[in-house]
C-alpha cells in the first residue's frame, strides 16, 4: 500500500487517516469481506504477557525509538519488552544486576542497600 494513499476516516473517532498512519483490518469469511480503519490513537494492541491494552501509537513509538528489545525476567522467566523491565542493583557492587519485569517488582520487596533502575539502558541489556 502506498504511503500517500487515503484510507478515509477512523471508524471510532472519525479522524482522517492518511499516509498510512493507522490500521486497516480486513475480515474475510468465505465470500464476504469487511474492512475497518482505525487511527493510531484509537487502535490498540494487547500485550501477550500481561494482557494490558497498549495504544498503537505508543507501540509504534517504542518501535521507532528502537526500544523493542526483549529481555527475560530473572524471576518469572517471561520475555518482556525492555521498556517494561527494571534492573535491581546492589549499592557498592557494580557487577550485581537482576532484571525483573514490572509485575515481579510489585510482588517483591527491595531490601535496603539495593536500588531499582527503571530505565534499563539498551547497552546493558
Image (cartoon, rainbow, N blue to C red):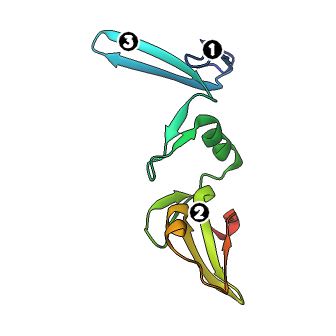
Crowdedness near tag 3: few (<14), some (14–19) or many (≥20) residues, C-alpha within 10 Å: few
Look at the picture and state if 68 lies above or below 93.
Answer: above
At 68% across and 20% down in the image, what residue appears? 19
Look at the picture and state if 87 lies above or below 11.
Answer: below
Q: Which residue occupies the foreground of this view, 122 or 120? A: 120
Look at the picture and state if 41 lies above or below 105.
Answer: above
For label 2, the SS is strand
Is there a contact, CB below 8 Å, between mark 3 and mark 1?
A: no
Disc 3/disc 1 C-alpha distance (Å): 21 Å
Is there a contact, CB below 8 Å, between mark 1 and mark 2?
A: no
Q: Position of residue 26 (x, y in %)?
A: 44, 19
Which of the two discs, 1 and 2, labels the residue nearer the N terminus? 1
Residue behind mark 3:
33
Disc 2/disc 3 C-alpha distance (Å): 40 Å
Is there a contact, CB below 8 Å, between mark 2 and mark 3?
A: no
Look at the picture and state if 57 lies above or below 38.
Answer: below
Residue behind mark 1:
14
The C terminus - image quarter: bottom right
At 67% across and 65% down in the image, what residue appears? 118
Residue behind mark 2:
85
Crowdedness near tag 2: few (<14), some (14–19) or many (≥20) residues, C-alpha within 10 Å: many
Q: Which residue occupies the foreground of this view, 116 or 77? A: 116
Amino acid at each position: 500500500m502506498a504511503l500517500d494513499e487515503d484510507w478515509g476516516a477512523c471508524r471510532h473517532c472519525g479522524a482522517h487517516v492518511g499516509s498510512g498512519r493507522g490500521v486497516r483490518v480486513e475480515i474475510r469469511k468465505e465470500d464476504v469481506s469487511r474492512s475497518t480503519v482505525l487511527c493510531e490513537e484509537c487502535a490498540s494492541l494487547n500485550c501477550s504477557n500481561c494482557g494490558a491494552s497498549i495504544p498503537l501509537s505508543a507501540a509504534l513509538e517504542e518501535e521507532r525509538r528502537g526500544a523493542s528489545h526483549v529481555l527475560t525476567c530473572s524471576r518469572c522467566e517471561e520475555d518482556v519488552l525492555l521498556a517494561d523491565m527494571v534492573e535491581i542493583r546492589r549499592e557498592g557492587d557494580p557487577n550485581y544486576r537482576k532484571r525483573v519485569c514490572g509485575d515481579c517488582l510489585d510482588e517483591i520487596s527491595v531490601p535496603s542497600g539495593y536500588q531499582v533502575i527503571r530505565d534499563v539502558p539498551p547497552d546493558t541489556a
